[in-house]
Amino acid sequence: MANNNSTGTAQAPSRMCTHNSHVRKVGIFGTGSYVPDKILSNADLEKLVDTSDEWIQTRTGIKERRVKADGISTSDLALEAAKKALAAANMAPEEIELIVVSTVTSDNYFPSTACHVQRKLGAVNAAAFDVSAACSGFIYGITVGWNMVSSGAFNNVLVIGAECLSTLLDFTDRNSCILFGDGAGAVVLKETTGKHQILFSHLGAKGDVDVMIVPAGGSKLPTSHATVDERLHYIKIRGREVFKFAVNKMTELIEDAANHLNIPVSEINIIIPHQVNHRIIESAAEKLNYPMEKMFVNIHKYGNTSAASIPIALDEAHSSGRLKDGDVVVMAAFGAGLTWGSCAIRW
Ligand code: UT7
């Protein structure tokens, strides 16, 4: 039965993943991220659609985003992030036993982007598959990787969030084309004695499938001249609806995480939210009475990179020294599906 939390929203159920002491503790041993060199600024978008730098910055906080070059695909971005994560973990590709790539912009329908990464990386001993949960993808992916290591099924797992969303953007639709960008982030998961330990995750979904969708190109409406003419192979979003959902869901995910950690929200050292819109992050911080300085934000540089958004932010938070040993880190995301998830780490 639905119940109401302090945000006043009907609370949809989330599956909570938590472990008993008999399973292995799992930690993040390396992080990495990569974005393409090419910058698409708000000024560039002014030349394509009826918009302005002022509108985009005020309504979203985005100043610019990265877009891939011709001939580059999601696995190329994923590969670069993976190489950095492996270097940080001081591991060779051959040591990886499983590659999980979270993406909605796979190189091909099949094979999976994870298999492309495996080949390019030379991770010859790895199993590989993709996870599709849109902007929540990395939280879903890290939950899978964590459980695979925790259960003892695999020892060394590479989890990547990677997207080339520019390939799904209609650069005649100002409602969507200003929001998204390309990029990738990766983590290496292994058994830990306690450092950088994943504590739990919450996952959820609610089949509101039309709020954000690419209508054509799948089995329901295969690509045809007509679907291309009607521009149905591009992202369609109902932004205002997502905005309301996002503020409430982000607030709820963080409150739930704090409750599960048995601490007040104020004791979370850093929150790494999905980089969806600066106003959404600010509104959630305000509702939670949580200082914006402790919210990690890099949306101004990259826009919304979907499944790549949180691992890029995690890597930047780590490499910029924002994460201190023992910090409680909470990551929270939501996306098309609708899907959502949070994950807590003791750094
Ligand atoms: O990860 C999940 C995917 N992300 C999302 O789905 C995004 C979530 N939603 C949002 O971030 C915000 O809702 C948007 C940034 C998309 C839109 O901001 P808003 O404050 O909700 O604007 P709005 O949709 O209420 O539109 C306000 C006005 C409209 O004009 P009228 O009807 O007031 O005359 C829009 O047509 O702004 C207009 N507008 C624009 N104007 C200039 C919409 N897009 C643009 C634009 N440039 N790019």
Image (cartoon, helix red, strand yellow):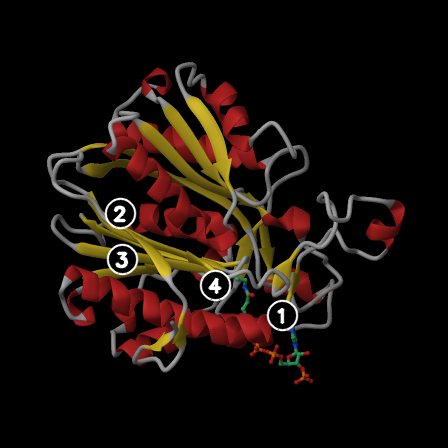
Q: Residue at point 63% right, 39% down?
A: 69
Q: Is disc 1's CB within 8 Å of ligand 1?
A: yes
* Disc 3/disc 2 C-alpha distance (Å): 13 Å
- State which mark lies toward you, 4 or 2: 4
Instruction: Find residue 238 and name its label.
Output: 1
Q: Residue at point 11% right, 35% down?
A: 193
Q: Residue at point 52% right, 44% down?
A: 132
- Kindly state the secondary structure of the residue where label 1 is placed: loop
Q: Is disc 4's CB within 8 Å of ligand 1?
A: yes
What amino acid is at disc 4?
Val
Q: Mark 1 Cα within 10 Å, few/some/many (few <14, many 20+)?
A: few
Give coordinates of residue 9: x percent, y percent: 40, 78
Find out whether the residues at labels 3 and 2 contact each other: C-beta distance under 8 Å: no
- State which mark lies toward you, 3 or 4: 3
* Disc 4/disc 2 C-alpha distance (Å): 20 Å
Find out whether the residues at labels 2 and 1 contact each other: C-beta distance under 8 Å: no
- Kindly state the secondary structure of the residue where label 2 is placed: helix
- Kindly state the secondary structure of the residue where label 3 is placed: strand
Q: Earlier in the sequence, mark 1 or mark 3?
A: 1
* Disc 3/disc 4 C-alpha distance (Å): 16 Å
Image height check: is 7 above or below 41?
below
- Kindly state the secondary structure of the residue where label 4 is placed: loop
- State which mark lies toward you, 3 or 2: 3
Q: To which residue does mark 4 refer? A: 276
Q: To which residue does mark 2 refer? A: 318
Q: To which residue does mark 3 refer? A: 330
